Image (cartoon, rainbow, N blue to C red):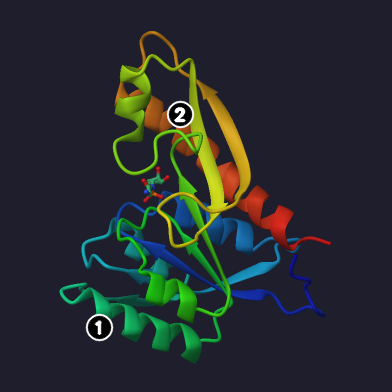
Amino acid sequence: MVLLTGFNKIKTAVFISGKGSNLKALIKFSKLKKSPININLIISNNPKSKGLKFAKIFKIKKKVFNYNHKNLSEKKILFELKKNKIKLICLAGFMKILSKYFIKNFKGIILNIHPSLLPKFKGLNTHERAIKNKEKYSGCTVHIVNSKLDSGKIILQKKVKIQKYDTPKTLADKILIQEHKLYPKAIMEIFSL
Ligand code: GAR
């Protein structure tokens, strides 16, 4: 449990690779009075991430790292995080796996949102696999990031019913709507008194 001191909000970096709809939801949440976080930095491995537009819209600093050399990119990111006094990282559709080195050397909390009911369906293509497996439910999970993929302590989960007519796309859309609510809720859960 981390306690908020005074009125200072927790300096947060959001990592994205794509569309950034979770980033947008987190930015909106961060603007609420009750929110314990402020988003100070957006990081992407992909210069074409559509989500980078939110940096401009909401006047948030952004940095893109090409990841041609993962170790070097991670060192540069760690430097940037330190420079900006970042204490919380929210992975939001960031499609690179953080190394053990990175996780050990970031002195703060790292959260991730994953589109399945972990520990089921770690990794990629979660919706396709849930449907193929004839699951009745799938959903999303916010968890702490540790050095094992999608395996850290679970903070919150939301179940979503899989209907007979669902395709990976319709299921992804339904779950994404829940992700946008779950991430802020999980942050409240971790940081509220
Ligand atoms: C979200 O569904 C997120 O859970 C998933 O990527 C999507 C990003 O959407 N993340 C992963 O699969 C991580 N392994 P967004 O860019 O619109 O937030």
Instruction: State whether residue 81 is above or below residue 168.
Output: below
- The crowd level at tag 2 (other Cα within 10 Å; few <14, some 14-19, many 20+) is some
Q: At x 49% / y 88%, what residue is drawn?
A: 82
Amino acid beneath label 2: Lys
Instruction: State whether residue 156 is above or below residue 111.
Output: above
Q: Nearer the viewer, residue 117 or 11?
A: 117
Instruction: Give the foreground label among 1 and 2.
Output: 1
The answer to whether mark 1 and mark 2 are in CB contact below 8 A is: no
Residue behind mark 2: 174
Q: At x 35% / y 69%, what residue is drawn?
A: 99
Q: Quadrant of the N terminus?
A: bottom right
Amino acid beneath label 1: Leu
Q: At x 60% / y 38%, what residue is drawn?
A: 157
Instruction: State whether residue 114 is above or below residue 5.
Output: above
Secondary structure beneath label 2:
helix
Is 96 placed left or right of 66 in the picture? right
Secondary structure beneath label 1:
helix
Percent across and percent down for residue 55 are: 40, 69
Q: Quadrant of the C terminus?
A: bottom right
Q: Decide if residue 59 is in sight here.
A: no
Percent across and percent down for residue 166 are: 36, 16
Residue behind mark 1: 72
Answer with mark 1 or mark 2, whichever residue precedes in sequence. Answer: 1
Is 190 placed left or right of 108 in the picture? right
Q: Nearer the viewer, residue 187 or 50?
A: 187
- The crowd level at tag 1 (other Cα within 10 Å; few <14, some 14-19, many 20+) is few
